[in-house]
């Protein structure tokens, strides 16, 4: 398989569906005489609860009917928060028997819903996305869409099924739904900054909430509750943060994929057991065959410079994306040549993605982001592994290796073995030059 075949167009070819008419979920809803779409959520943390609010804000014809989480108290809290919100009043119908808990909670939510929101420890995004579309349900899945090559392959499988069944399959990589960035990308497509030679992406922030361990929790339960700080659950800081920026860069580059990546990474400032086994900084350099490069940097630290920015360097000028700010274009000397009207952002990107999702269902033209979810996530995985190994890594080789991050979670439980901290209370982090990717056959590096 060539690198071109692994590009977005290649992913679309991989996902080409077999012929045959399939009854869509929106057709089933209309056939039943109702325009109301039932939403269920798997993963009742802040992002999952936010996705419900965004969907209720976006469209009047959605109702929340089911909630699932490993921990019942979190689902109950989400129910109360949505019921008390302005957009949720009278639009949430979740009795106790439609609150599902435990590692199989996603199954109950899927059974009750037309649209399944999936926002929980990232390790579980691909299999739950797959389960939703296999059941004939539309899906909104937060990023990243895999923490390893195997997860990316599962996301591709889900995308194929969504295409076959004509299901909406929308990504939490939300920058592509920002209405002002859409205008900016069109100007890039029109050649207004010339040929893109390089892109710079920074996502520098303070740490997410650091959860102290309670005596009654097992080591596995603690790591799951503190999942934003353990690689086997979240896919590292590149996946948690910088992936948004990398997806924006790939969008501007028409989803052309890099060939290789090398990176620097490690722990420099936050020495707390609660930070788990994450690097607190990484710099990634992605190389293209024609000489283009993506330069990315992520850092999570207190009392340091923070920002979220993408800069596209073209032969005629630059385009700058600044988190949720207003994008703008300059010439090569930094003089501003274009800035959109802020009023054109009639919805936030978080609301817009749900507006687009529900509209696509109602119009019988469901959006399927699944293939770019896979390709963008795989670029993040490539950067993560390059920072861990200290070697130059190949997109194609890593993708085809279908490696899995340990431990195996085919049958998850609070008793499954996970790496424990050392005598000093700190967790072992990857050591560049020593770390190897276990594929079941041989190490990648």
Image (cartoon, rainbow, N blue to C red):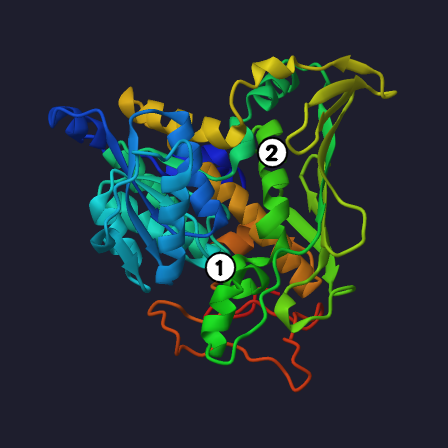
The quadrant of the rendering that contains the C terminus is bottom right
Name the image quarter holding residue 321: top right
Q: Which residue has dot 2 on it?
A: 248
Q: Is residue 445 left or right of residue 308?
A: left
Residue drawn at 62 percent across, 69 percent down = 274
Task: Pick whichever of labels 1 and 2 is earlier in the sequence.
Answer: 2
Q: Percent x, y for residue 432? A: 71, 67
Judging depth in this view, the residue of 384 and 5 nearest the camera is 384
Q: Which residue appears farthest toward the front when viewing the image?
A: 84
Residue drawn at 64 percent across, 16 percent down = 342
Q: Is residue 427 left or right of residue 299?
A: left
Q: Percent x, y for residue 69? A: 36, 57
Of marks 1 and 2, the one in the foreground: 2
Q: Is residue 2 above or below residue 414?
A: above
Q: Residues within 10 Å of mark 1 (few under 14, many from 20)?
A: many
Q: Percent x, y for residue 22? A: 18, 31
Q: Could you tell me which secondary element the residue under label 1 belongs to?
A: helix
Q: Could you tell me which secondary element the residue under label 2 belongs to?
A: helix
Q: Is residue 75 left or right of residue 133?
A: right
Judging depth in this view, the residue of 165 and 215 nearest the camera is 215
Q: Percent x, y for residue 162? A: 30, 38
Judging depth in this view, the residue of 416 and 33 nearest the camera is 33
Residue drawn at 33 percent across, 70 percent down = 411
The label shown at residue 401 is 1
């Amino acid at each position: 398989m060539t690198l071109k075949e692994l590009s977005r167009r290649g992913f679309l070819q991989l996902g080409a569906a077999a012929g045959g008419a399939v009854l869509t979920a929106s057709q089933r809803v209309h056939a039943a005489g109702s325009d109301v779409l039932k939403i269920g959520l798997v993963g009742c943390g802040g992002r999952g609860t936010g996705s419900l609010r965004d969907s209720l804000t976006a469209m009047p014809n959605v109702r929340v009917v089911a909630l699932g989480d490993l921990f019942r108290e979190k689902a109950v809290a989400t129910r109360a928060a949505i019921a008390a919100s302005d957009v949720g009043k009278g639009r949430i119908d979740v009795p106790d028997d439609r609150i599902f808990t435990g590692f199989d909670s996603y199954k109950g939510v899927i059974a009750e819903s037309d649209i399944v929101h999936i926002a929980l420890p990232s390790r579980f995004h691909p299999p739950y996305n797959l389960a939703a579309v296999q059941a004939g349900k539309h899906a909104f899945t937060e990023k990243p869409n895999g923490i390893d090559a195997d997860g990316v392959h599962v996301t591709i499988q889900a995308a194929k099924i969504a295409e076959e069944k004509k299901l909406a399959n929308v990504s939490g990589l939300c920058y592509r739904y920002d209405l002002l960035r859409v205008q900016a990308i069109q100007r890039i497509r029109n050649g207004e900054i010339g040929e893109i030679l390089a892109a710079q992406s920074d996502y520098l922030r303070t740490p997410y909430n650091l959860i102290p361990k309670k005596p009654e929790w097992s080591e596995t339960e603690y790591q799951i509750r503190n999942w934003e700080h353990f690689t086997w659950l979240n896919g590292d800081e590149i996946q948690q943060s910088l992936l948004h920026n990398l997806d924006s860069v790939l969008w501007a580059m028409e989803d052309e994929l890099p060939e290789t990546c090398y990176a620097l990474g490690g722990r420099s400032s936050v020495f707390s057991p609660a930070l788990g086994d994450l690097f607190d900084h990484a710099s990634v350099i992605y190389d293209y065959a024609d000489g283009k490069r993506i330069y990315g940097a992520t850092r999570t630290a207190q009392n340091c410079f923070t920002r979220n920015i993408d800069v596209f360097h073209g032969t005629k000028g630059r385009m700058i994306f600044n988190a949720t700010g207003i994008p703008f274009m300059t010439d090569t000397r930094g003089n501003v040549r274009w800035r959109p009207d802020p009023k054109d952002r009639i919805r936030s990107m978080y609301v817009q993605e749900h507006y687009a999702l529900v509209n696509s269902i109602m119009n019988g033209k469901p959006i399927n982001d699944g293939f770019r979810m896979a390709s963008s996530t795989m670029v993040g995985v490539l950067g993560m592994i390059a920072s861990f190994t200290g070697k130059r890594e190949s997109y194609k080789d890593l993708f085809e290796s279908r490696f899995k991050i340990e431990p195996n979670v085919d049958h998850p439980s609070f008793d499954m073995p996970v790496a424990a901290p050392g005598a000093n209370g700190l967790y072992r982090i990857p050591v560049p030059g020593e770390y190897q990717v276990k594929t079941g056959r041989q190490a990648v590096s």
